[in-house]
Image (tube, rainbow, N blue to C red):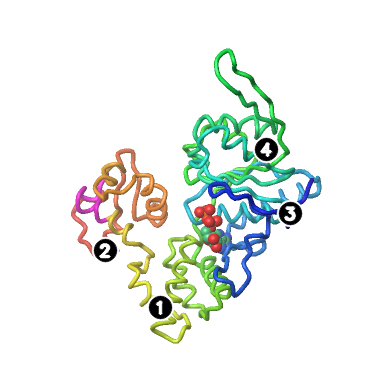
Amino acid sequence: MQHRNPQQSAPDDSIHAKVSAGSVEMEAGSEFISLRPKHLKEYVGQAKVVETLKIAIEAALKRKEPLDHILFHGPPGLGKTTLGHIIAEEMGVNITITSGPALEKGGDLLGILTHLEEGDVLFIDEIHRLPRVVEEFLYPAMEDFAVDFIFDKGIYARSHRYRLERFALVGATTRAGLLSPPIRERFGMFRTLDFYSANDLAKIARRSAALLDVNIDNDGAYEIACRSRGTPRIVNRLLKRVRDFAQVRGDGAIRKVTVQEALALEGVDEKGLTVLDRKFLTAVIDFYKGGPVGIEAIAATLQEESDTLMDVVEPYLLKIGFLTRTSSGRKVSEEAYRHFGLPIQQGLFR
Ligand code: ADP
């Protein structure tokens, strides 16, 4: 297997980025410090996924073969892209990053596929949003490492078969259900990432604080963890807001009370609910008597995209039991009423 060339420069392409593994690293002291773990041993939580990957990577390296195609599923911010980078780093290959909606025509994908080197990782985010014509290109590419490209139309149509280097496709999706069966079946591994425990999120908060050179105590880290909706990306976002607050209003150190005060300003409550989460729940309570109500009706009331509500808002509300999904629609739970201090009407939850 051909290994990466660290000198290789990424082509100027704003939609699809080819990154030599390791090149995403930022030097401490530069303007931007990457909080992304670069190796599996730094990746916090998701123990089973990490174990599966360790075995698969070690086996592929021993056989000097590319990794099998992998599909990661889970809500945004749980670490799917991070795993794509880690896989490339651990395999010692390049990663090319693109996303379903960025690939409009078969030719877009062909350009990327023909530039892949042996063993490279191709990461496709939001793979469930690949247009059908592009998806059909991917089937033979995944299975036979070849693509048939048809030039011209009608009697002038000519087909050319391109041989590809063997690559590993890493797909990420927030909605595995929207993926067509033919593409799903071509992945050798399929793993769902779960929301993280508060302990794991606290570990991430401490790790990120150390990278940002911010002083945080255990209670401060745990408080951020509890308000991060089970999501590492939110830990990092809240940590940065609390860091600003601590520097301006305090002595720069982050303690539990610093987090409480800073996040009250951000509109993040003690359960981690954001303004949008609360708007979602109160819309169902105020306009639809707590439900059941369809997602499209909620989206219309909030003037939000239903996809955003389904991808970003609902998974965590379902996870903490503030929302339930029934065949007739979404229902707000008794716990949510209690969280808002609202009276529970007689018979509402029978
Ligand atoms: P996704 O692709 O699932 O939307 P990302 O991989 O972009 O999520 O993760 C968002 C951020 O959260 C990353 O930049 C990284 O800093 C952090 N992160 C994600 N997972 C972990 C983890 N397991 N350990 C530490 N940090 C993590």
Q: Nearer the viewer, residue 163 or 182?
A: 163
Q: Position of residue 34 (x, y in %)?
A: 57, 65
Q: Nearer the viewer, residue 42 or 51?
A: 42
Question: From the viewer's perspective, is 187 left or right of 103?
Answer: right
Q: Position of residue 191 (x, y in %)?
A: 58, 47
Residue furthest top in the image? 155
- Which residue corresponds to mark 1? 245
**Mark 3 → mark 4, Cα distance in angstroms:** 19 Å
Secondary structure beneath dot 3 equals loop
Question: From the viewer's perspective, is 241 left or right of 38?
Answer: left
Residue 219 belongs to the span the image colors magenta: no
**Part of the protein shown in magenta:** 282-292
Instruction: Tell me which label, 3 or 2, sits earlier in the chain.
Output: 3
Judge: label 4 CB < 8 Å from ligand 1: no
The reply to whether dot 4 and dot 1 touch (C-beta < 8 Å) is: no
Q: Tell me which residue sits at (69%, 51%) in the image.
A: 94
**Mark 4 → mark 1, Cα distance in angstroms:** 49 Å
Q: Position of residue 293 (x, y in %)?
A: 27, 43
The reply to whether dot 3 and dot 1 touch (C-beta < 8 Å) is: no
- Which residue corresponds to mark 2? 340
Instruction: Tell me which label, 1 or 2, sits earlier in the chain.
Output: 1
Q: Residues within 10 Å of mark 3 (few under 14, many from 20)?
A: many
Judge: label 1 CB < 8 Å from ligand 1: no
Q: Residues within 10 Å of mark 1 (few under 14, many from 20)?
A: many
Q: Which mark is residue 12?
A: none
Secondary structure beneath dot 2 equals loop
Q: Which mark is residue 114?
A: 4
**Mark 2 → mark 4, Cα distance in angstroms:** 55 Å
Dot 1 amino acid type: Phe
